[in-house]
Amino acid sequence: MYTEIKVTVRYAETDKMGITHHSVYPIWYELARTEMIKNIGITYTEMENEGIMLPLSELSCKYMIPSTYEDELTIRVKISKLTPARIVFNYETYKEGIEKPIATGSTIHAWADSKTLKPINFKKHFPEYYEKIEKLIEN
């Protein structure tokens, strides 16, 4: 199941060529990921308050078609893999009027203890959250 957010490219997000800077896409990915977590019925703040962190271990982006100032974009995110140790999110960026994604990406995050940043078995320590995320994937 995908979660979508809409963004409009701001002037500050473009480079000298007028194209959206590559560094902006991971920020949009975070916005979409945060919205997805909220849709599950959890917030990042709640997770962090309970001792759960999601440090980023890997990020990839592939840019096919540029976006520019004031373009209306849709960022789609889905969870492609969930294990007791990691979670993988996949992203697609769509530009209004173009059917295919203009960019794709993924992020891999580890489940970690907020105090030690050491890996945890998320399924074992937080089974209710794990189950909510698992159900989202199944849908």
Image (tube, rainbow, N blue to C red):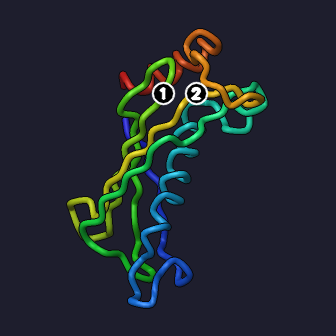
Q: As rendered, which of 57 and 72 lies closer to the eye?
A: 57
Label 2, secondary structure: give it.
loop
Q: Residue at x 58, y 27 (%)?
A: 111
Q: Position of residue 81 (x, y in %)?
A: 38, 28
Q: Position of residue 38 (x, y in %)?
A: 60, 38
Q: As rendered, which of 32 and 24 lies closer to the eye?
A: 24
Q: Position of residue 55 (x, y in %)?
A: 59, 39
The N terminus - image quarter: top left
Residue where numbered disc 1 is placed:
86
Residue where numbered disc 2 is placed:
111
Q: Is residue 70 left or right of residue 40?
A: left
The C terminus - image quarter: top left
Label 1, secondary structure: give it.
strand
Q: Quadrant of residue 42?
A: top right
Q: Residue at x 54, y 42 (%)?
A: 56
Q: Is residue 115 left or right of residue 88?
A: right
Q: Quadrant of residue 114?
A: top right
Q: Residue at x 53, y 21 (%)?
A: 132
Relative vertical location of residue 84 with respect to residue 62 in this rendering, above or below: above
Crowding around mark 2 (Cα neighbors within 10 Å: few <14, some 14 to 19, many 20+) is: many
Q: Position of residue 100 (x, y in %)?
A: 21, 60
Amino acid type of the residue tagged 1 in the rendering: Arg
Q: Residue at x 47, y 75 (%)?
A: 9
Crowding around mark 1 (Cα neighbors within 10 Å: few <14, some 14 to 19, many 20+) is: many
